[in-house]
């Protein structure tokens, strides 16, 4: 099964469980996955929190890069979403600092952006970003990104 078809399978599995009214987090495909969402927009943080927690994720929120770095160290997330454009410490700087830390260099960092140019993607690759996700995002795109980047952990932890 290809990574893309596995991702589609798990999203379908999640959608089916949720449609049946199966809302117990341990029965959801992303149960036990810790996700950190770093964004200066309260609307984006709250939307992401709702979408991801409905899929079973434990969601940690941070409003800027400095807050996000502290929460990375305190919470050891499995996946990190970081907004590209934030005051004080932007997403590229935040990603670079996460990836330079030996304990977190393998933690997937997904850049959230409304700008999708070749330059932006190249800059993201230079600092170690694992993926780009365009804003506004939807529930499916967030869940697919988490599934894609946590496949190995979920197979080890839950035998999925």
Image (spheres, grey):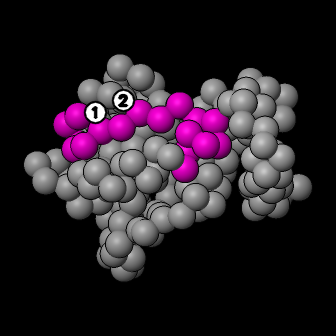
Name the spot of residue 1 as percent of width and height, x first: 88, 55
Of helix, strand and loop, which one carries label 1? helix
Q: Which quadrant: the C terminus?
A: top right
Mark linked to residue 19: none
Q: Residue lying farthest bottom?
A: 117
> Is residue 66 positioned above or below 11 on the image?
above
- In this rendering, the answer to whether 86 lies above or below 102 is below
Is residue 155 in view? no
Q: What residue lies at 25% left-to-right and 43% top-to-bottom?
A: 63
Q: Residue at x 40, y 44 (%)?
A: 37
Q: CA distance from mark 2 to mark 1?
A: 5 Å
Which numbered disc covers residue 72?
Answer: 2
Res 151 visible: yes
* Residue 66 part of the magenta segment: yes
Res 54 → quadrant? top right
- Outermost residue toward the front in this view: 21
Number of numbered discs = 2
Which range of residues does the magenta coloring cover? Answer: 51-67
Q: Is residue 159 above or below residue 41?
A: above
């Amino acid at each position: 099964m290809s990574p893309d078809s596995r991702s589609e399978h798990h999203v379908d599995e999640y959608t089916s469980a949720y449609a049946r009214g199966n809302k117990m987090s341990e029965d959801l495909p992303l149960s036990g996955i810790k996700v950190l969402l770093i964004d200066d927009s309260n609307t984006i943080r709250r939307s992401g929190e709702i979408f991801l927690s409905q899929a079973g994720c434990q969601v940690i929120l941070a409003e800027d890069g400095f807050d996000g770095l502290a929460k990375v160290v305190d919470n050891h997330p499995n996946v990190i979403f970081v907004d590209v454009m934030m005051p004080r410490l932007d997403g590229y700087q935040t990603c670079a600092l996460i990836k330079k830390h030996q304990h977190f260099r393998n933690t997937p960092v997904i850049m959230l952006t409304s700008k999708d140019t070749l330059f932006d993607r190249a800059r993201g690759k230079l600092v170690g970003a694992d993926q780009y996700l365009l804003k506004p995002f939807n529930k499916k795109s967030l869940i697919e990104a988490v599934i894609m980047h946590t496949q190995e952990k979920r197979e080890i932890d839950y035998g999925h």
